Image (cartoon, rainbow, N blue to C red):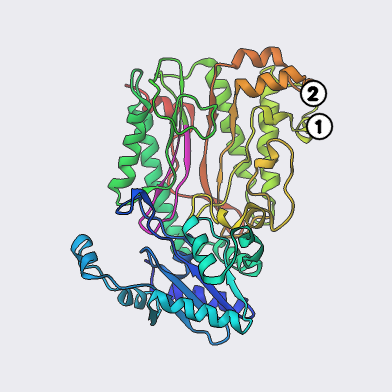
Amino acid sequence: MFDKQLYINRRRVLKSKMDQGIILFLGNDESPMNYADNTYYFRQHSSFLYYFGLDRPSLAAIIDLESGDETVFGDELTIDDIVWMGNLPTLKEDCERVGITEVLPTVKMYTILREAQAIGRNIHFLPPYRPRNKIKLLRLLNIRPDQFTLKSSEELVKVVISQREIKEAEEIVEIDKAVNWSVDMHEAAIKMARPGMNEAEISAEVTKIALACEGYISFPVIATVNGEVLHNHFHGNILKEGQLFLLDAGAETPLHYAGDLTSTFPVSKKFSNQQKDIYQLVLDAHTKSASKLRPEITFREVHFEACRTIFEGLKQLGLTRGDTEEAIAEGAHALFFPHGLGHMMGIDVHDMEDLGEINVGYNGEAKSAQFGLKSLRLAKELKPGFVLTIEPGIYFIPALVNIWKTEKRLEQFINYAEVDKYLGFGGIRIEQDYLITPNSYRLLGRKKPMEISEIEALRNY
């Protein structure tokens, strides 16, 4: 965990921005895989981590906005727990390390919340995303599952976002660390991949690197020769000469800060000419859109810079045609680039997404319903301290192309006869992570191999 004062300051700022009532934070519990004692890797609720820093299961906390009292609720380990888990620090000792002196058994929380409800006090809570916490809210506050979103605190959501979206210096150090580990993962994959190898071998190697750093992966690894499938977690294919390999993977530090990178490279020693054309176009889209990053520009504008670059480049290759601005307004580019340019990143790899894309990425404004643009997770004006990803891509998705071609959709902008020649191509995505600075931006972590020459040099087996 960070220094005690950091957590004290975060809670102080939170209290200063809220009016009245009490704030309830629910930590996460262990989640069984197939029976109670065989659990998945434990991951604490990120907002609970942000304010309390306690990375252990079955905790909750209450902040009283009138009195200023801060209380953590949880049960100390029994001798049975110690036999199986070892002699760990007590909950009270852990709480003292983050500036909390009031620690009560979990059962006491029920009484406090019921008494608060009885006298009509506001009880602020964040929208739950885990079933166990939904059950707890039903028991604690008698709120039905279909009312969680309606009755969660919009005020609290906005304040938490306003704090968490601006990264502190200590957080940036952690994210730099996570990204550097992620670069190690990607370099290893680029060096090791060979024809005849199984995708799972590469997935295992990059996961091993994250674990060897005493961290973890920040999301399930995407390691695939079918890069046109945007979130492909199947790892059963055998690599073959002439294919492209897409790796989307990141490390998470012990404090749970994330890295998120994507690399695409040839299974062969070199890119083919066709692969070079599309790869360089994606790289240009990455470079040009990243160069636009600065405070006060909207990320929507940055996204459209990538769309513009991709459409123009495909026009040079004969796949698209017509006026670029008109085509982008109609969404023609989304046949090839059907997702958003990037997302916020921090304690979560998609930072604060449990608080809602509209709140985190749009400041409450409505999203577009247009195909492609509706998948843009971040659109609002950028501020110093934001951490985000840039990840343009070009994909040739046969099912999508066939639907658009059959419907003759936007054929004034798309040369389907030429597009058909790429239907076995796959997909290319290139991703790095950036910090918005007071006047510009900076790359987080060290630069990963992205230029064609850099990648082919590592493929020299």
For the record, the magenta segment spans: 247-263
Height in image: 168 above or below 298? below
Residue 188's x, y, as percent?
A: 34, 34
Question: Disc 1 to disc 2, how far (Cα)?
Answer: 8 Å
Q: Is residue 316 visible?
A: no
Q: Quadrant of the C terminus?
A: top left
Height in image: 213 above or below 60? above
The amino acid sitting under disc 1 is Glu
View extreme (left): residue: 83
Residue 176's x, y, as percent?
A: 43, 53
Height in image: 72 above or below 190? below
Is 257 in the magenta?
A: yes
Q: Quadrant of the N terminus?
A: bottom left
Q: Are marks 1 and 2 in contact (CB under 8 Å)?
A: yes
Viewer-proximal residue, 18 or 269? 18
The amino acid sitting under disc 2 is Gly
**Circle 1 sits on which residue?**
326
